[in-house]
Image: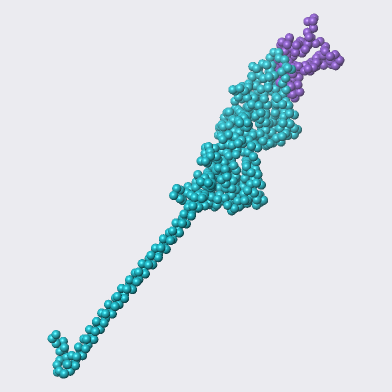
Chain colours: A cyan, B purple
Amino acid sequence: MHEYKLAPTALPQLPKAPTGIEGLDEITEGGLPLGRPTLVCGSAGCGKTLLGIEFLVRGILDYDEPGVLMTFEETADELAANVTSLGFDLKAMQADKKLRVDHVHIDRSEIEETGEYDLEGLFIRLGYAIDSIGAKRVMLDTIEALFSGFPNEAVLRSEIRRLFRWLKEKGVTTVITAERGEGTLTRQGLEEYVSDCVILLDNRVIDQITTRRLRIVKYRGSTHGTNEYPYLITEDGISVLPVTSLKLEHTVSDEIISSGVSGLDDMFTRRGWYKGSSILITGTAGTAKTTLAASFALEACRRGERCLFFAFEESPAQLIRNMRSVGVDLQPCVDQGLLVIEASRPTLNGLERHLVTVHKLITEYQPQAVVIDPISNLVSVGSISEVRSMLTRLIDFLKVNNVTALFTALVSGRDGRMEMTEEGVSSLVDTWISVRDLEGIGERNRGLSILKARGMAHSNQVREFLVTEHGIQLLDVIIGPLGIITGAGRLTQRMQEQAQLVAQQHELSRRDRELERKRRVLEATIANLRTEFESVEEELRQVNDEESARQQALDRARTSASHGLNNLPLRQPNTQPE
Amino acid sequence: MMDTSEATAATDPKTWELRLYIAGQTVKSVTALANLKRYCEEHLVDCYTLEVIDLLKNPQLAEGDQILAIPTLVRKVPEPIRKIIGDLSNEEKVLVGLDIRPHGTH
C-alpha cells in the first residue's frame, strides 16, 4: 500500500529496460517498456531477429538479466552460428544458464486437428524456460509462424492474446518479431495484441543503395523520438543513429583559434573562429580547399591539439606529399601522433556506415579538430537529403563534443554555389568561407571571401590569394575603378600606378624648378631694388653731408664774424634775422 | 496407461507407440484421454503403448516432442511422427491421422 501511495510522485515515468543497443535507448528515452511486450516488425532482411538477439545478449552481458529466446524459424545452432560474427557467443551463455534457446518446430504436415485445443503447451514451454534461468527478457522470433501450423485462426488469435497478457503478468520484457504485411504493420495483425511499443524496421533501396531505417510507431506511456532513424548492422551489432543533440543545448566556447592562414584570420574581427564551431569551405575545383584545410590541421597540431583528417579523395601519402609542396608539412604531426589521416573512397560504404566510422574514430581518438575533405563526395553514395541528414547528425555530434570541424565541399558552376551547400549544410555550419576562381581575360585567380561567420563581424571583401611555397598568402586589396582587382589586372593597375607616380614626381620636380626660378628672379629683383636703394641712399647721404658741411662752414663764418663784434650777446645768432 | 504390450511392439511392425500430452485435468485433456482410450481399445487391442504426459508436472518434456497445443497426441511409431491436436472428438480424423485402418468387423 505504501508503494501505491508513493507511485505517482516517485515513478513519474514508465520503468524501462535498457536495450544496450547503440542509439536505440536514446530514441526510446531509456529502453523498451519494462515487463511488457514490444513488437518489432519489418520486412525480410531488416535485422529483426538480430535486434531481438542483441536485446537479449546485451541484457545478459550488461544488465545481468537472463533471457529466453524462443525461435519459430531457425534452430538454436543456426542462430548461434549467425550471430557468432557479431561476437555473441550464445553457446557459452547457454552453458552459463544465462540464456535459453527453445526452437519451436512447426510442421503443418505432421499436425492433424480434431476438436478443441489450446496452446497451453507453448505457455508451459515458455514458462519452464523462463523459470529455469530466472529470465527477465524474452524474445519470440516470428511468432507468426504459428499461423502456418495451426489452421484454426480463431483459437490461435485468442491464444496469442492470452500469451501476451500472460507475459505481461510474468513481468518479463518481451520482444516479438513479425514480418511486415501489405498495408499493415504485420501480416497477421499482431499489432492489435501488442499495444505497448511497436518498432518498425525498414529496408529501402534508393539508387542501388540500401538504407535501413528504424521508427518507433508507438510507445504507450512514454515519449519517444518519432523520426525515421537510419541504423546499421555493424560488426558490433545494431547501431541506430539518432540526431545526437535533439535539444540543441550543447555548451559553447568563447575561445578563438586560428585558421592557420594569418591573412584569413585578419578577415575576422576576432582573428580566427570559435573553438568547437563548424566551418565550411566551398569552392570550385582547384581552388585550394584542401590546402586551406591542411593549413588548419597543421595549425591545430602546432597548438598541440589532436586532429583527425578524413580524406575522401587522396591517400594519406599523396596528401602529405602534395601539401608539403606548398609548405604545409604534415609529416611531423603524423609522426608525433597528433594528426591521423583516414582515407577512404566515399563509395566504399554507404553514408550511414561512413557516419559510424567517423563516430567510432572520433570516440576512439578524441580529437579537438576534425577535417572532412570533401563532404560533397558523399553525395555520390546518397541523395542530397540523406547527406544532409547525415551531416546534421555529424555536426551535432561534433558540436556536442566541442570539436572544431572543418568541411570542404566541391561546388560546380560559375556562380560557385550548389543547392547542396546552399540549402543543405550552410544553415548547419557557423562559418562559411567561399573560395573561387576569379576568371579574367586569359587567366584564373583565386579569390576568398567569408559568406558568414556566426558570432563575429568579418570582412566583406573578396581577397585574392596565392598558394606559395610557404602556404597560402592573402594579397592586399587593390581597388580599381570597377572594384577589386586581381591577377594581371592587379599588375596593370600597379604599373599604371607606378607610371602615375613617376609622372607625379616629374610634375613635382618641374614645379620645384619653377619655384626655384621664381625665387631666383625674386632674389635678383630684390638685389636690384637693394642696389637702387643703396644708390638713392648714397645720394641722399651725400646731399645731407654736403648740406651739413655747408652749414658748418656757414657757422664758422658767423663765429669768426662775431669775434669781431665781441660785446654782442651769445644769443645773437638766434635772434639774427633771416 | 503404459506398456500394455512392449514385447509385441518390438516385433510386430503394426504396433502403435502413442503419447498423449496434457496439462492438468482440464476438460479437454480428460475428454481427449477418454476418446483415445476408446479408440485404442476398439482398434488397437494389444498392439499399442500409450504414455500420458502431464506437462504441468514435467514441463521439460514439452520441448522434446515440439508440443505447443494441448492436448496433443503424438504417434511416435509407426514412422513418420504424426501429431493430432485437440480433444480427439472426431473419430474418423483420429483414425486416419493415426494411420489405423478400421477393422472390418467394427
Residue A573, how many percent across, how many down? 16, 88
Q: Nearer the viewer, residue B17 or A225?
A: A225
Residue A236, how many percent across, how many down? 68, 36
Quadrant for the N terminus of chain A in the image = top right
Task: Indicate left or right for A480 with A110 as reference.
Answer: left
Query: What residue is at 74 percent from the left and 22 percent from the top?
Result: B66
Q: Nearer the viewer, residue B23 or A175?
A: A175
Query: What residue is at 76 percent from the left and 16 percent from the top?
Result: B82
Work out whether residue A338 can be spotted.
Answer: no
Q: How many marks?
A: 0
Residue A34, how many percent across, how many down? 62, 31
User: Residue B31: which quarter of the image?
Assistant: top right
Q: Nearer the viewer, residue A43 or A126?
A: A43
Quadrant for the C terminus of chain A in the image = bottom left
Task: Indicate left or right for A565 with A48 as reference.
Answer: left
Task: Indicate left or right for A448 with B8 as reference.
Answer: left
Residue B84, how many percent across, how many down? 73, 15
Task: Indicate left or right for A553 with A286 as reference.
Answer: left
Query: What residue is at 70 percent from the left and 22 percent from the top?
Result: A122
Measured along the vertical axis of the image, is residue A133 above or below residue A278? above
Measured along the vertical axis of the image, is residue A494 above or below residue A138? below
Q: Residue furthest top?
A: B105
Query: What residue is at 15 percent from the left and 94 percent from the top?
Result: A565
Measured along the vertical axis of the image, is residue A348 above or below residue A557? above
Work out whether residue A312 can be spotted.
Answer: yes
Q: Nearer the viewer, residue A220 or A284?
A: A284
User: Residue A14: which quarter of the image?
Assistant: top right
User: Residue A539: which quarter of the image?
Assistant: bottom left
